[in-house]
Image (cartoon, helix red, strand yellow):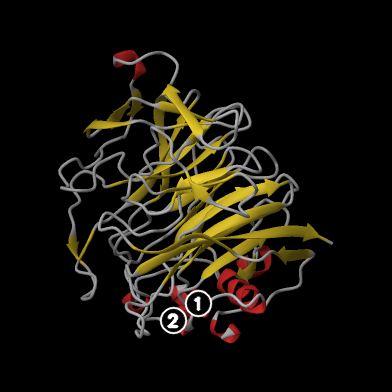
Amino acid sequence: MLALALLPGLVCSRIVLEWNDPVLISAPTLAAPAGPGAPEFFYNFDHSHFWGPELLGTPSSFAFSADEGRHWTGAKGPDVPSVAWPLLPTDGGGFRSLGGGLSFDMGGWNMTWPRLYTLDPGGGNFSTADAPGGVGPSHTVRFHGVPFPGANVTHPSIHPGSRNYGVARTAAGGYVLATCILWNGLQPRAGPPHEGEFTPFSVVAFTSDDGYDWSYSSVIANWSTSDMYWGPNENDVSLLSDNSTLLAVLRMDGDSACASQSYRYYGASYSTDGGLSWSAPAPMDGAGCVRPKLKLLDSGPLLLTGGRLCVEGAQGVYLWVNEDGMGGIGGGDPRVEWQRHSISYQHNRLWAARGGDPRYLFNESVNASDGWGTLSYTSIMPTGPDSAAIAYQQYGAYGPNSTVHTWPGPNTNFAIQVKVKVV
């Protein structure tokens, strides 16, 4: 069974990884109609305390860990943040939501009721409060300045501000946010036969000094009519180890199973002026294709997780490590700049070694272009200067005698700790 989860060939590197046993976050649950059960919105309050939704679309289903992800319990907070948008890191280890209640026009959108979330003194949950400044017009979170032709507000389901992904805090304390828009005038159109209609996304950046007033800055990755279906969409943004440069890693195209043939490797785009302008995305050969997550460790290396490596015909979940924390900005071969590791392989190896329930092993579907062993959505939560816990997901088979692993399927979430050593 161990060979069924890919272990890619590794390049020469000074990086050595030490993996701990995977931990079950939540037992198999049938994914809710509102969304798959992917642990993609898990957050650190500090290096020990993590929190996030076990199952998207299920308001009462949350998991909490107070010991670096070794054990998980249900979180029972009276009010929880929306998981439709990222949370903004604030001083003191808390988070603030972007808000909700969208109103929009072609030039931007407004969001209301931003909330603060902080860890309770006992460490077993979190508390919420209105963000400073009260409520009302002066409290509205405002996104403005989208240039001509503006954002498309006529699409029935994809409105401006509804697909925010990557956010980073700059060294000066401000914020940079990457979000998807449809340029005004573009409409869904026919895609590949198995995908039906596709939506031509572009990813643009907004900057803010305070997280309340956001100004459009530039395009990070634009949809191109010549060679894209969905266009760039899911992404993450990180400050790099020079404490100045920003990196955005983007899902560049594709949807559905790997057989769709519209997938691409991740794209990497850099900003050296605080998010005001970005380089054209360069393909990250060997990395991708969906929901990238970035986290810079205090010790220097940069971590990237994600998967559905459809360009290479695999559905697994992976970790890529960039040794110097600069994300390959100098150019060169991405397969050298980023060392690739199979999380599904490490999961199977460690789970089998401790005699774990075999139904929680990844099967051969992670190596197939037409399978659904995992959605490949993840979260990274640092546990110290050189270590992190990675949350990931596995689809189980329908029925006790079934061998079919499919989306959405019974959903199981895990966490695995990894230490990143430079030798």
Where's residue 318, x and y in %? 56, 67
Residue drawn 76% across the image and 65% down it? 16
Looking at the rendered structure, the secondary structure element under dot 1 is loop
The mark lying in front, picked from 1 and 2, is 1
Quarter of the image for the N terminus: give it. bottom right
Where's residue 176, x and y in %? 49, 36
Can residue 255 be seen?
A: yes
Within-10-Å neighbours for mark 2: few <14, some 14–19, many 20+:
many
Q: Amino acid at mark 1?
A: Phe
Residue drawn 72% across the image and 58% down it? 419
**Count of numbered marks:** 2
Q: Which residue is nearer to you in this view: 43 or 73?
A: 73
State yes or no: discs 1 and 2 in contact (Cβ < 8 Å).
yes
Q: Amino acid at mark 2?
A: Ser
> Which residue has dot 2 on it?
365
Residue drawn 43% across the image and 53% down it? 54
Within-10-Å neighbours for mark 1: few <14, some 14–19, many 20+:
many
Q: Judge from the rendering whether residue 81 lies leftward or rightward of residue 2; answer left or right.
A: left
> Which residue has dot 1 on it?
362
Q: Which residue is nearer to you in this view: 366 or 355?
A: 355
Q: Is residue 375 above or below residue 163?
A: below
